Image (cartoon, helix red, strand yellow):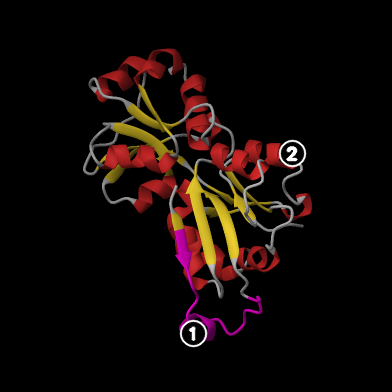
Amino acid sequence: MSIFRIFATVYMLFALPCISWAGQSVTIFAAASLKDALDEIAMAYPGEVIISYGGSGLLARQVAQGAPVDVVFLANDAWMDWLEEQGAIVPQSRVDLLGNSLVVVAPRGAVEFTPKSADDLLKRLAGGRLAVGQTQGVPAGIYARQWLENIGFWEKVQPYLAETENVRTALALVSRHEAPMGVVYGSDALADPGVTIIYQIPPELHDDITYPMAAVKGGNAADFLDFMQSNQTFEIFTKHGFIVLGVPQ
């Protein structure tokens, strides 16, 4: 996981005259796939932002164990449901803020590919491995497994997976030519010029991809949560390939 610290500048304060947020320091645990968008949002927030990125399952377990954090922003509803069951978040603060797509990527310049059978997919791998997030705990890996199961490829392809601790690591394996293909989010593919989308996975072949955000109990999150649901942040998320789903009712 990486730690990202940004302090607001006088320029930022004057550039946002309509914002009334107090600008207090806030610590966020966020899914790795959010990094580029959240880094930009942190630069615009009028206060200190500390962000720790990682796989949603790992972050959720750390929050449940009492990690000092104000906001948790995950890539899977199931992990946020679990945190709510553990009494670790403020339920009324929870919002499914974003959506995403699932794609197959290959190193830059690769040709498009529609897998028609498991053998077809293995032939394209050419002895290499398909990079995915961990299929039992990382949301992108869970969605990838659902796709492979729903098209009947799972049993043959599973031995040829390279499972990683988060989706950005899977992306890096493909970008560095260490894996011939990978399954990542559409927003990840936009973030790395070293990869090319070769196949758009039909959304009906996996659960809906949602990014729930919530305040952690005992944290100091109110101002930042308001900021995260502003038009300014929605524009940033859209630019980075996410789908804005809405705000709490």
Could you tell me residue 105's position as x and y percent?
33, 38
Image point (55%, 32%), residue name = 204
Question: Label 1: how many residues lie within 10 Å, few (<14), some (14-19) or many (20+)?
Answer: few
Q: Quadrant of residue 163?
A: top left
Q: Which residue is mark 2?
A: 86
**Would residue 114 be visible to someone looking at this image?**
yes
Image point (55%, 38%), residue name = 58
Image point (30%, 37%), residue name = 173
Mark closest to the chain's N terminus, 1 or 2? 1
Vertical position of residue 32 compared to residue 116: above or below: below
Say whether residue 227 is left or right of residue 128. Answer: right
Q: Which residue is mark 1?
A: 10
Closer to us: 180 or 170 = 170
Amino acid carrying mark 2 in the image: Gln
Q: Quadrant of residue 209?
A: top right
Image point (78%, 53%), residue name = 92
| Residue 20 on the magenta span | yes
Helix, strand or loop for disc 1:
helix
Question: Label 2: how many residues lie within 10 Å, few (<14), some (14-19) or many (20+)?
Answer: few
Amino acid carrying mark 1 in the image: Val
Helix, strand or loop for disc 2:
loop
Q: CA distance from mark 1 to mark 2?
A: 40 Å
| Residue 104 on the magenta span | no
Q: Which residues are magenta?
A: 4-22
Could you tell me residue 168's position as x and y percent?
40, 43
| Residue farthest along the top direction in this orientation | 155
Q: Quadrant of residue 18?
A: bottom right
Vertical position of residue 147 compared to residue 248: above or below: above
Closer to us: 99 or 116 = 99
Vertical position of residue 33 compared to residue 228: above or below: above
Name the disc covering residue 176, or none: none
